[in-house]
Image (cartoon, grey):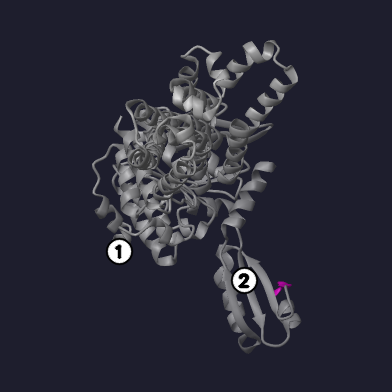
């Protein structure tokens, strides 16, 4: 048990020293603040407090940023050691492959959680200070932070999977960029196209919401939107959320990290250094 | 079985349709230093990774003591130095070695070990600032962690300067002195000849020789190469010595170890006609070629 913690400790040291933690946190703070101030205009017309609007804007931001940041750390998890020629050495130690993977994953998740909490927390605090906040909008902020960390966990696991599948860090980086594009951009575009073609048929009413929630990025969006009326109103997309049971989005977002990690472990086990 | 630290019996490994290790049998006793020689692609690294249990094999058995490769016991008992190893550039030497110590579950004197390999000054510097030789020393320091029963060193001298090589062999002797079986993969005979007890030669995945260097050389009966540079007339020199002209001014002749002194006396007797003399004892290349030819027949 202490072995995976040894890996975690070294990995955290690396993230802190190569300034990854600092840069990721800065990116989160800057984007979250920018969106909070840019998105503060509609508060009056919608009759909600500024924090609610801010959370809605930051939800949209997090869909793009959380997977991106997660993939940016995890693509190197296995492939970096392959490139340096240190993987065979690491594997010759008594630590199992699952322990190595879990150790790195834990460190990466901790770093991501720190960046998310500080970034969204700062923006949330600023929004609450200037535009007011209520118990509901505070809950929405907390939910945003937690689900963002979960979404990050999904892509940390998927990034590790790609890292174990790719031959080298450059290939892993390329694959990660592709993965991000598919999950975050192309998937939704494809669904949109299908819905337009279907013109409100069976697909749109019964299949589409499930296909949508199967994508962790959309599940994240749905979870945050469905849970808060105010957020749903400001983001203007409630249709899909109403067609699904309440548990659909949380289950998707909770199953994905486990599934991704198991797949990454399976790929790592087959890897011959 | 237990008197051998490392026992390899009839090991085979296929990579696709090619057999990269074929029927390898090799034993290393505690305290014994064995050089594993062979050219690039001969199967040295594959053999070492098989011993570590990092890659699956296709027949035969490997035992570290009595443990199977890759088992928890075998991993604790084995130390490994990969070829041209590198570490994460953001960590310091101390941090990297501390990680390895924690992974091995040993309470280790990290600064002491780093001092032992000559990295005392670079303890808290990032590995990114290390030279190739320093990274190699750091790799060596982790070999010394715990008391390994089997130490597998893959090209340990690559990137080291001559003085570092001396240090390296002192450390290898120390390991062997503590009772570790040391297997050193290399392709430079001159570096391992004086420092190992036995030499095994691999050629295209087949073990073609396994004996002491003296026995191997005697069995092979390889010639010593003499290159004589003429002061003026190389043709005349070639005619008198009976060798071959190799370029404008030199003559090359081969002689057996027994005839060496006789040939030198003849060359010395020619006085002013000889400008220079170069003597090359048989190299790995020659030994290697010899044993490779023998297996083909």
**Is residue B242 one of those drawn in magenta?**
yes
In the image, what residue occupies the spot 33% across and 41% down? A129
Quadrant location, the C terminus of chain B: top right
Identify the chain of the residue marked 2, using the numbered disc in the image: B
Q: Nearer the viewer, residue A197 or A7?
A: A197
Range of the magenta residues?
Answer: B241-245
Mark 1 or mark 2: name the one nearer the start of the chain: 1
In the image, what residue occupies the spot 46% across and 51% down? B86
The mark lying in front, picked from 1 and 2, is 1
Query: Does residue A14 appear to the left or right of B116 in the view shown?
Result: right
Identify the chain of the residue marked 1, using the numbered disc in the image: B
**Element marked by disc 1:** helix
Give the labeled residue for mark 2.
B226
Give the labeled residue for mark 1.
B121
Q: Nearer the viewer, residue B165 or B208?
A: B165
Quarter assignment of residue B99: top left
In the image, what residue occupies the spot 34% across and 57% down? B170
Q: Is residue A205 above or below residue B281?
A: above
The location of residue B244, given as percent across then percent down, is 73, 71
């Amino acid at each position: 048990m202490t072995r995976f913690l040894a890996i975690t400790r070294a990995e955290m040291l690396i993230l802190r020293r190569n300034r990854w933690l600092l840069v990721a946190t800065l990116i989160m703070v800057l984007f979250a603040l920018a969106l909070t101030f840019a998105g503060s205009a509609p508060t009056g017309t919608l009759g909600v407090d500024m924090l609610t609007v801010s959370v809605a804007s930051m939800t949209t931001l997090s869909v793009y940023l959380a997977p991106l940041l997660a993939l940016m750390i995890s693509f190197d998890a296995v492939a970096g050691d392959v490139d340096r020629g240190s993987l065979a050495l690491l594997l010759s130690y008594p630590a199992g492959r699952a322990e190595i993977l879990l150790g790195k994953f834990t460190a990466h998740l901790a770093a991501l959680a720190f960046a998310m909490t500080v970034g969204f927390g700062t923006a949330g605090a600023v929004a609450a200070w200037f535009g007011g906040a209520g118990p509901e909008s505070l809950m929405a902020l907390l939910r945003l932070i937690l689900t963002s960390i979960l979404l990050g966990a999904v892509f940390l696991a998927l990034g590790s999977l790609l890292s174990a599948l790719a031959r080298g860090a450059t290939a892993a980086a390329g694959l990660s960029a592709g993965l991000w594009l598919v999950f975050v951009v192309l998937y939704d575009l494809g669904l949109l196209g299908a819905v337009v073609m279907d013109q409100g048929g069976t697909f749109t009413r019964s299949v589409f919401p499930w296909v949508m929630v199967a994508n962790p990025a959309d599940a994240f969006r749905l979870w945050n939107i469905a849970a808060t009326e105010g957020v749903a109103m400001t983001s203007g997309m409630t249709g899909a959320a109403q067609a699904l049971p309440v548990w659909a989005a949380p289950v998707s977002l909770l199953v994905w990290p486990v599934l991704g990690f198991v797949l990454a472990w399976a790929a790592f086990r087959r890897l011959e250094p | 079985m237990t008197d051998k630290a490392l026992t390899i019996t009839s090991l085979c490994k296929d990579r696709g349709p090619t057999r990269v290790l074929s029927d390898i049998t090799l034993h290393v006793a505690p305290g014994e230093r064995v050089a594993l020689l062979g050219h690039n692609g001969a199967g040295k690294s594959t053999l070492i990774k098989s011993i570590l249990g990092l890659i699956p094999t296709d027949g035969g058995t490997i035992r570290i003591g009595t443990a199977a490769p890759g088992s928890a016991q075998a991993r604790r008992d084995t130390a490994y130095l990969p070829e041209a190893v590198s570490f994460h550039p953001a960590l310091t030497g101390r941090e990297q070695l501390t990680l390895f110590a924690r992974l091995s579950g040993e309470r280790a004197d990290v600064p002491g070990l780093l001092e032992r390999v000559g990295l005392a000054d670079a303890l808290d510097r990032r590995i990114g600032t290390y030279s190739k030789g320093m990274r190699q020393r750091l790799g060596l320091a982790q070999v010394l962690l715990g008391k390994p029963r089997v130490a597998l060193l893959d090209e340990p001298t690559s990137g080291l300067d001559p003085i570092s090589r001396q240090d390296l062999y002192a450390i290898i002797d120390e390991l062997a002195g503590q009772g570790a079986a040391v297997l050193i993969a290399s392709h430079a005979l001159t570096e391992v000849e004086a420092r190992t007890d036995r030499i095994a030669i691999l050629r295209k995945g087949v073990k073609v020789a396994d004996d002491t260097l003296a026995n191997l050389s005697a069995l092979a009966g390889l010639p010593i190469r003499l290159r004589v540079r003429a002061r003026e007339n190389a043709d005349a020199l070639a005619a008198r010595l009976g060798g071959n002209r190799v370029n404008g001014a030199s003559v090359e002749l081969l002689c057996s170890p027994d005839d060496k002194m006789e040939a030198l006396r003849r060359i010395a007797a020619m006085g002013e006609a000889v400008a220079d003399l170069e003597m090359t004892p048989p190299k790995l290349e020659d030994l290697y070629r010899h044993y490779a030819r023998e297996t083909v027949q």
